[in-house]
């Protein structure tokens, strides 16, 4: 019997348009609105029964902060690993990163950027849903991490910060 793996995909929350003085795109920080959205997504993850065991995040400042705030707000018991290969990654590069996830990991949170995350969803699902900043998707995967490929995922949840804010 195969184990269903759960891939949580979180797009970094709303970031500053311009990088800090002396920094490039990689150094852009979250806006206050983005910090609130990252916390809200973390709180949502913390209320669910299948929160992540491991978090892989881009090492860009806005993605790292999104991951850290979500983990803290959700009181998630997961290790955070910063993965430089996620920054500006294509869907194919993201699949390569995911294929290296230990087989013992059943639930993973991936934090990164567009257009790569949307393309990854498109590859796994066969269609690319709208995926705005701060959005969180839950994808069930019947395949092990090592053999992820086209069409092996099923979208079971897609939440945006606007939807969560509307529920307040």
Image (cartoon, rainbow, N blue to C red):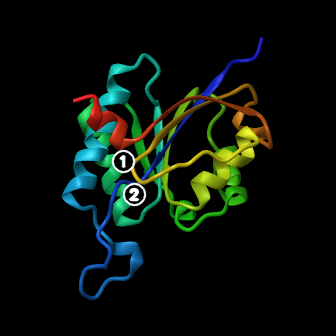
- Tell me: 72 left or right of 44: left
Q: Secondary structure at mark 1?
A: helix
Q: Please state which of residues 63 and 119 is positioned toward the viewer in this rendering.
A: 119
In the image: residue 7, left or right of residue 165: right
Quarter of the view holding residue 12: bottom left
| As drawn, 47 above or below 98 | above
Circle 1 crowding by C-alpha within 10 Å: few under 14, some 14–19, many from 20 = many
Tag on residue 67?
1
Q: CA distance from mark 2 to mark 1?
A: 6 Å
Which image quarter holds the N terminus? top right
Left or right of 107: which side holds 30? left
Please tell me which residue is depicted at 40% across the width and 39% down the height of the picture.
79
> Looking at the image, which residue is at 80% across and 43% down?
150
SS assignment at label 2 = helix
Residue sitting farthest toward the bottom: 22
**In which quadrant of the rendered image does the C terminus lie?**
top left
On screen, 56 above or below 85?
above
Give x and y (percent) for residue 108.
Answer: 53, 35
Q: How many numbered marks, from 0 up?
A: 2
Label 2 crowding class (10 Å Cα cut-off): few <14, some 14-19, many 20+?
many
| Residues marked 2 and 1 touching at CB (< 8 Å) | yes
Give the residue at mark 2.
Answer: 63
Q: Quadrant of residue 147?
A: top right
130 horizontally vs 14: left or right: right
């Amino acid at each position: 019997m195969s184990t269903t793996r759960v891939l949580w995909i979180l797009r970094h929350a709303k970031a500053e348009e311009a990088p800090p003085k002396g920094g490039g795109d990689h150094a852009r920080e979250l806006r206050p609105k983005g910090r609130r959205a990252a916390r809200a997504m973390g709180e949502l993850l913390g209320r669910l029964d299948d929160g992540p065991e491991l978090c892989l995040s881009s090492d860009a400042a806005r993605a790292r902060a999104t991951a850290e705030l979500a983990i803290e707000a959700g009181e998630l018991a997961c290790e955070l690993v910063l993965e430089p290969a996620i920054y500006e990654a294509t869907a194919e590069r993201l699949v390569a990163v995911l294929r290296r996830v230990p087989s013992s990991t059943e639930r993973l949170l991936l934090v990164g950027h567009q257009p790569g995350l949307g393309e990854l969803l498109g590859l796994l699902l066969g269609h690319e849903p709208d995926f705005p900043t701060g959005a969180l998707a839950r994808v069930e995967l019947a395949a092990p991490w090592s053999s992820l490929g086209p069409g092996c995922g099923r979208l079971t949840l897609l939440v945006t910060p606007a939807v969560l804010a509307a529920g307040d």
